[in-house]
Image (spheres, grey):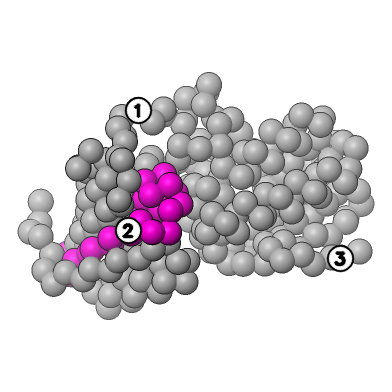
Amino acid sequence: MSGKPTGRERFIVCGDRDEIDRIQQGILVVLVRYGYDDAACFAVRTAIEEAVSNAIHHGNDNDPRRMVTIEYAADEMSIEIEIEDEGAGFDPESVPDPTRPENVDIPSGRGIMLMRVYMNEVEFTASGTRVRMRYEKKSGHTL
Amino acid sequence: MSSTTSHIRVQDQDGVKRIEFVERNILDEANIQQIGEEIGRVVDSQDKPKVLISFTNVDHLSSAALGTLITINNKIRGRDGQLRLAEIDPQIYEVFVITKLNKLFQIFDTSEQALASFA
């Protein structure tokens, strides 16, 4: 495994869509500057989108008084992202496998799966209120 | 005939409602909920709905959007209708493959192929 990327940036948001889009775009600009290709940017954006959405809607229960913290560090080798909400937490293992035949018609439960497929590492801590994700440019998801 | 609502464009093509998205990114849950309601009204406007959803302008979608598509599919099936998806970008199609939703939905490369598939 390569070392931790250096130079962290931290944002605290309340769920405002335009602000989240600006942060995502800013992270993608950094990745492009470090030579990440289109598939890598798609993978990282998908994972951030799902994690932030989980934090706002499930973690913070759509309460605008509760904040979501987005922290990332990137270099030419990898990007590490941590997203934390102010909710009660959850057990990620309790989310049913959405690809099982009995669950395929159920509209929810695919976000965590996408994060795990697109990123090299996904780890939930702090009782499920914080997720740390890592994408490695060399071995990351490619189309 | 063509009509424009806030998030989708709807065309009637030989009894099939062909729907396109206005936005390139279908990510925001509030927008997705409105899209679901708008498509729901299109479905409700037909007895046995025939609906084609084209992703021709779409660059990115979230799992919430997938959930809305599943809800729409359930609604159409419940009314003995047919749903087709078409013109999905390869990166987005991969999301359907990962989630195995490519097996749930009937997906076509082009709108023409999808239109020809309606019974």
- Identify which residue, B92 or B6, lies in the foreground: B6
Residue B38 shows up from this direction: yes
Q: CA distance from mark 1 to mark 2?
A: 22 Å
Q: Give SS at disc 2.
A: strand
Please, which chain is the residue tagged with disc 1 on?
Answer: A
Which amino acid is tagged 3?
Ser
Where's residue B54, x and y in %? 69, 56
Which amino acid is tagged 2?
Val
Q: Is residue A129 above or below residue B21?
A: above
Do the residues marked 1 and 3 share a common chain? no
Left or right, B100 with reference to A117: right
- Identify which residue, A139 or B71, lies in the foreground: B71
Please, which chain is the residue tagged with disc 3 on?
Answer: B
- Residue matched to label 2: A68
Where's residue A71, x and y in %? 23, 63
Where's residue A69, x and y in %? 28, 60
Which amino acid is tagged 1?
Ser
Outermost residue on the front side: it is A65
- Residue matched to label 3: B2
Q: Is label 2 in contact with label 3 (beta carbons under 8 Å)?
A: no
Q: Is A70 a magenta residue?
A: yes
Do the residues marked 1 and 2 share a common chain? yes
Question: Residue at 68% of width from left, 63% of height from top?
Answer: B7
- Residue matched to label 1: A94
Question: Residue at 79% of width from left, 67% of height from top?
Answer: B4
Q: Is residue A60 above or below residue A94?
A: below
Q: Nearer the viewer, mark 1 or mark 3?
A: 1
Q: Is label 1 in contact with label 3 (beta carbons under 8 Å)?
A: no
Q: Which residues are magenta?
A: A50-77
Q: Nearer the viewer, mark 1 or mark 2?
A: 2
